[in-house]
Image (cartoon, helix red, strand yellow):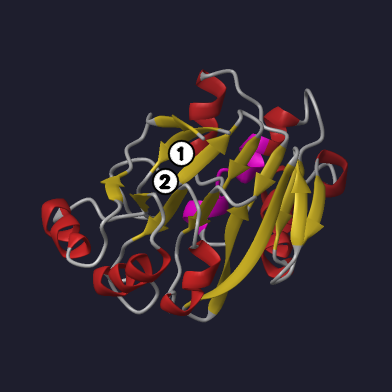
Amino acid sequence: MFIRILGTGPADTSRYNTSVLIDDSILIDAGPTVPVQLFSMDILPRYILLTHPHGDHILGLPILMLRLSRSHRPIIYGFRETIRKARLLWSETYGLVEAEKIADFRTFEHGDVLQVEGYRVRVLQRPHGPMRTAVFKFDDSMVYATDVRDVEEDACYYMGVDVLFHEVGEGSYHTPVDELAKLLSRANPSLTYIIHYDDDMDEAGVLARLKQYYRGEVRFARRGMSLVL
């Protein structure tokens, strides 16, 4: 598994929106800063996994679909409400052609296991304020979790993974540092990358608090980083 980090910022960031690319074929989330990065690298993913329908996770989708449709029909996964908004977004921007002629839309639900490019991707539903967001677990090697809350109970889901991508944020919709620390102390993944964090976050302070509970390696993810599992 080859993972490229395309962005680590939230909606109102001065950085790039949070997204990762796996094996240059599987994209997780498609915020407005994602298309230009992919196009500049001449990478056109075949699969797009959407966590939830907030703008910093789907607003780049119409432009991406438009470009991808010249070479192939992408497969786009999401909860039914996320797919509904993705279709609506296309129809309101480039609606001369029906969305289904441009992409293959597929819905999933909590507990589903998807077969994506040779990976078994398990879907976990978590709350994100009044909506739900999807957490993705690739085989037993990687978990991707952003815009989630109340995560400590999911420790068994994260156990044994090689790398965990997890957000840290403020407010009632996101995972506070102490909550993430409790999760890590129970799940103990080998390596944790922090994603979807605010521009002014006290990174040294966050790492120090996490280290009080978690003995594994933890880093703040940066755009342009890559790793091989």
- The answer to whether residue 71 is visible is yes
- How many badges with numbers are in the image? 2
**Quadrant of residue 94 in the image?**
top right
Q: What's under tag 1, amino acid-wise?
A: Thr
Q: Quadrant of the N terminus?
A: top right
Q: Quick check: is 40 in the magenta stretch?
A: no
Q: Position of residue 182 (x, y in %)?
A: 32, 73
* As drawn, 184 above or below 164: below
Q: Which residues are magenta?
A: 55-64
* As drawn, 206 above or below 19: below
- Say if mark 1 contacts mark 2, CB within 8 Å: yes
What residue do we see at 72% from left, 30% from top?
A: 68
- The answer to whether residue 51 is visible is no
Q: Position of residue 224 (x, y in %)?
A: 38, 29
The tag on residue 132 is none
- The residue nearer to you, when weighing 48 against 60, is 48
What residue do we see at 37% from left, 45% from top?
A: 8
Task: Identify the residue under disc 2.
Answer: 17
Helix, strand or loop at mark 2: loop
- The residue nearer to you, when weighing 213 against 169, is 213
Task: Identify the residue under disc 1.
Answer: 33
Helix, strand or loop at mark 1: loop
* As drawn, 35 above or below 199: above
Q: Position of residue 17 (x, y in %)?
A: 41, 46
